[in-house]
Amino acid sequence: MAKKTAKKAPAKKSKAAAKGNGKAARPDLSRSPAMKGLIVQAQDIHGEIKGGRRPSLRVPIRSLSNVTFSLRKGFFTIGKKVSKRTLSYQTIKPFAQTVRMMAFAKHLIETDDFASKREVYYNSKGSTKRSSEDGAAGWGPAAFKEQPESDAIMDDMEAMVGVNREQLGFIPAEQYGSVAGKLTVIEIDPATGRRIEIDCTAFGRGSYSIPSRVEGIQFRTKAKFVLAVETAALFERLNGHAYWRDGKCIVIAMGGVPSRANRRFVRLLSDSCKLPVYVFTDGDPYGYGNIYRTMKVGSGNAAHISEYFCVPHAKLLGVTPQDIKDYDLPTHPLEEKDKKRAQDAIKNDPFFRNTKEWVNALQEMVKMGVRVEHQAFAARGLNYVMETYLPEKLRNPRKMLP
């Protein structure tokens, strides 16, 4: 069979041409920040070996002791403390695992592929019947015994390279969240390179599911704000009654503590469309400290990538301690673990202790000795939350917490 002669593509494609055939140019991932970061790390290791020195890995320390809250930036930032891990008899295995995972990430970037955290673990074990550059032959003595080993190496590598692990091709196996409302999501079909426009009002009682990798997604909307809610149950009520239509908004289910993909999606949406973000959680120290704070400023052990996964201008719409009084909501006693969590946030959390409104709110909650679930509004009627509470809070943003 005669070979087909491939036509040489023009160096640049006009916007009109791209629009006409519905295709979008794929980014050159070989020049991505992730690839550049991997190359820098590899060059450092190579340079030390070539210079007759034992190579070292310098890993930023990921804990609150090495984290500061930047009032100017509005999110957690990692400090300058690093852990230097020099190759030795004791460190040879984790050192080899880190370098091998760097090579695996390079392959994923070059092939525009991805692997779940669990797949990385199994890939290291490999198969004796296969051999390929994607690691199918296994990593030999560098194979992981348990997944927590590979997860820890992945987190370290992310901090070393200075990009999020999704950019390195690694994705978690979790639910990423649901979206409904006045939004068109524009994705690129990975198989054809064509633009796909997804209308988030056209799913009936269903919804658009946030993908694991959201980089490159574009948005078009006439919504006035984003409402991120803690539970799927509240999302279903708001979506089932098309609250987003009259509310002129986009409703997003966080599903508890929001996943990285969920937070990145909200951040990209908010930045590109200049939309305010309001968060709706249970009124308790866990909802405030683990769900809302993670969405707004990030988390202490992932401060090295907070700039990608936080929404600094987000506000807590509710449920606030003041809401308990204003709406006479049924409550539950604040347990000792809740009191301890609130007091620890006031004393040790860089975000809460530097925000006067939050110090006052947490102190008030401890003084009241109660907590409240956001479903408590159902005591006033199943649809009270969207017919009365949400409209009133949205008219009075000063009653929200920063």
Image: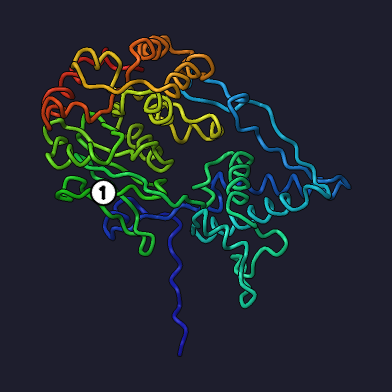
193 relative to 237, above or below: below
The residue that appears at 12% across and 23% down in the rendered structure is 388
Residue type at tag 1:
Tyr
Residue that mark 1 sits on: 208
| Residue at (31, 34) in percent of width and height | 230
Q: In this view, does 331 lie above or below 204?
A: above
Q: How many labels does the image show?
A: 1
Image quadrant occupied by the N terminus:
bottom left
Check the image and report above or below for 369 versus 149: above
Q: Which of the 4 image quarters holds residue 100?
A: bottom right
* Residue 142 screen position, x and y as percent: 70, 58
Give percent across and percent down for residue 233. 23, 40
Element marked by disc 1? strand
Q: Does residue 277 appear in this view?
A: no
358 up-or-down from 242: above or below: above
Task: Describe residue 348's horizontal placement relative to residue 181 as left or right.
Answer: right
In the image, 323 versus 52, the foreground residue is: 323
Give the x, y percent position of residue 92.
Answer: 78, 51
- Seen at 20% across and 42% down, the residue is 236
Figure colour scheme: rainbow
Q: Indicate left or right for 185 with 289 as reference.
A: left
